[in-house]
Amino acid sequence: MTPNITELTPAQFHEWVQSIVDETLFESRERLVALLAENANTEALAEEFRGFFDDYCGLAFALEDHEEFLISMLETCDTFAPLRHRVAAVEAVRKTSPLGRESRRTGGYIIGDHVPEIKVVDLSADEFRSLMVPLANWQLFAARERVMKLLSANTYSNDSNSPLQNGALSVDTLNTRLKSAFLEFFVCYLELEQFLEDYDYDSDDGLEIRPEFAEELDREDEYIKSGGKLIPIEEVAKKLGLKW
């Protein structure tokens, strides 16, 4: 069962937020920024974008089960009204269902769901670079930095109003600011997800399958057709020493 984020203690919320902002997407983004700054060629950018997109999918999988809870947190305070408006703007233009968005991250589509018209692999070198620039500079990454600063400043004690040694702010105040900063981070993620909705991209396209792996898959296919028991693909990959 998915834990209700709204019922976490401040310490538990702190720990959960830490796990989200430690996702590998943020390391990939730094590499993408560096490549853009040095005017790297399209091949290098495309290879890093492959990792960036996979890491974005990892962040999406980490957040999607909590989306309803996080949006409900925006209803708890008038201060979050601007964030609520941004969420409403995303929801107003979304073209895919929750299941469709989940399927797209694994390279599939849901029948009847929106199919994006812009194929990333068909973009020219200039068009592809133009796509990388806003992605690398998305507000999500600035929001993440604010969350990181609050995480590093936040401590817990039995007295929630006790001042911190490194400043005059109480733990309660820092907890409130962390919640606010993370909700902004979350809304930035929703906006990034909506932006990518218009692009057709599968990070597995163009990857070569090792010959021995392909042969093993063929053997498993023949085995199944002849009445044998299905062996999960994860087990096949494990026998070959591959990460799946």
Image: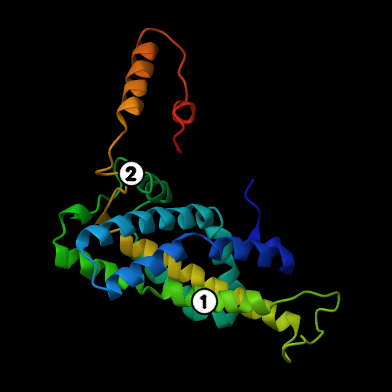
Where residue 55 appears, x then y in whole percent?
43, 56
The residue indicated by pointer 1 is: 145
Horizontal relation, residue 200 to residue 185: left or right:
left
Question: Which quarter of the rendering shows the C terminus?
Answer: top left
* Residue 28 sits above or below residue 106 on the image: below
Q: Quadrant of residue 222?
A: top left
Q: Judging from the image, what secondary structure is the residue with disc 1 in?
A: helix
Say which element carries label 2: loop
Residue type, numbered disc 1? Glu
Q: Quadrant of the N terminus?
A: top right
Q: Is residue 225 above or below residue 81?
A: above
Classify residue 87 as left or right of residue 137. right
Q: Give the residue number, with chain letter if any, for mark 2.
A: 107
Where in the figure is residue 172, as x and y percent of width and height?
74, 80
Q: Residue at x 58, y 65 (%)?
A: 72
The numbered mark at residue 71 is: none
Residue at horizontal 44%, vertical 35%? 242
Q: Residue at x 78, y 74 (%)?
A: 156
Nearest to the observer: residue 149 or residue 200: 149
